[in-house]
Image (spheres, rainbow, N blue to C red):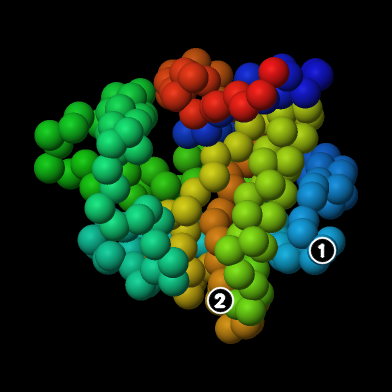
Amino acid sequence: MDVYEAVDSRRAVRAFSGRPVPKEVLERVLAAAARAPSSGNLQPWHVYVVTGEPLAELKKRATAKALAGDPGDEREYPMYPAGLASPYLDRFSAAAAQRYEALGIERDDPARPVKIAVLNAEAFGAPVVLFCYLDRTMGPGQWGDAGMYLQTVMLLLRAEGLHSCPQVMWTTYRETVSEMVGADDELVLFCGVAVGFEKEGAPQLRTTRADMTETVSFVGT
């Protein structure tokens, strides 16, 4: 699979099979992803790879909280800026509508928030979740570095025939996650990434993207 195919086929999969992911594949992906760029070569990320019984227990705890309507832990960073306006709000709304339609959750379903929380807490059935942390002393530049690192990871997963789904949702269960993985208080949870093989027959959602002319300006000849 060349890099263009990996980029084009990467999408946030929300239905994984129970097929296990070989540890050697994860090791190969994460070793190669270390080549991702980072300012000053700080490599500010720290990843915990959770599988098996620890992941089953984490899903169980998170699902129980979701079913109980527990709003979770206070976020340590905002998921979106306050007062999100057009065109960003338009893109967000369109993507949300496409996503929940594919999951079979009606927009006016009163149980929608709980259903969404439970699906996320179960990591959509993924057998692996990567939890990416950064040291609290790091700034916006290093958070950008972590994003480039995770994109590299997700593209390498595609090269291995795997899919992924980044989940900022896990930050609302950050205390439970940190307890399970043993992360100390000096680390802040950036996000989780569900990893696995896509479930056969599951609806394949590809959210629309803005035309290049909306986001790119060429200056010069």
Q: Position of residue 113 (x, y in %)?
A: 24, 47
Q: Nearer the viewer, residue 66 or 146?
A: 146
- 180 relative to 108, above or below: below
**Which residue is under mark 2?**
179
Is 174 left, or right, of 31 in this rendering?
Answer: left
Which of the 4 quarters of the picture holds residue 101?
top left
- 216 relative to 38, above or below: above
**Image quadrant occupied by the C terminus:** top right
Hey, which residue is sitting farthest bottom in the picture?
185
**Image quadrant occupied by the N terminus:** top right
Q: Cα distance, mark 2 to mark 1?
A: 31 Å
Q: Amino acid at mark 2?
A: Glu
Q: Please rate how many residues cluster around mark 1, counting C-alpha atoms within 10 Å: few if below 14, some from 14 to 19, many from 20.
A: few
Q: Is residue 166 visible?
A: yes
Is 43 left, or right, of 94 in this rendering?
Answer: right
- 143 relative to 74, above or below: above
**Which residue is under mark 1?**
40
Q: Position of residue 164 (x, y in %)?
A: 60, 37
Q: Please rate how many residues cluster around mark 2, counting C-alpha atoms within 10 Å: few if below 14, some from 14 to 19, many from 20.
A: few
Q: Is residue 55 visible?
A: no
Q: Amino acid at mark 1?
A: Gly
Front label number (2 vs 1): 1
Hey, which residue is sitting farthest front in the picture?
220
Chain-order first, disc 2 or disc 1: 1
Whether label 2 touches label 1, CB < 8 Å: no
Which element carries disc 1, helix, strand or loop? helix
Q: Nearer the viewer, residue 187 or 145?
A: 145
Residue in the picture at 49% in, 19% down: 213
Q: Position of residue 115 (x, y in %)?
A: 28, 44
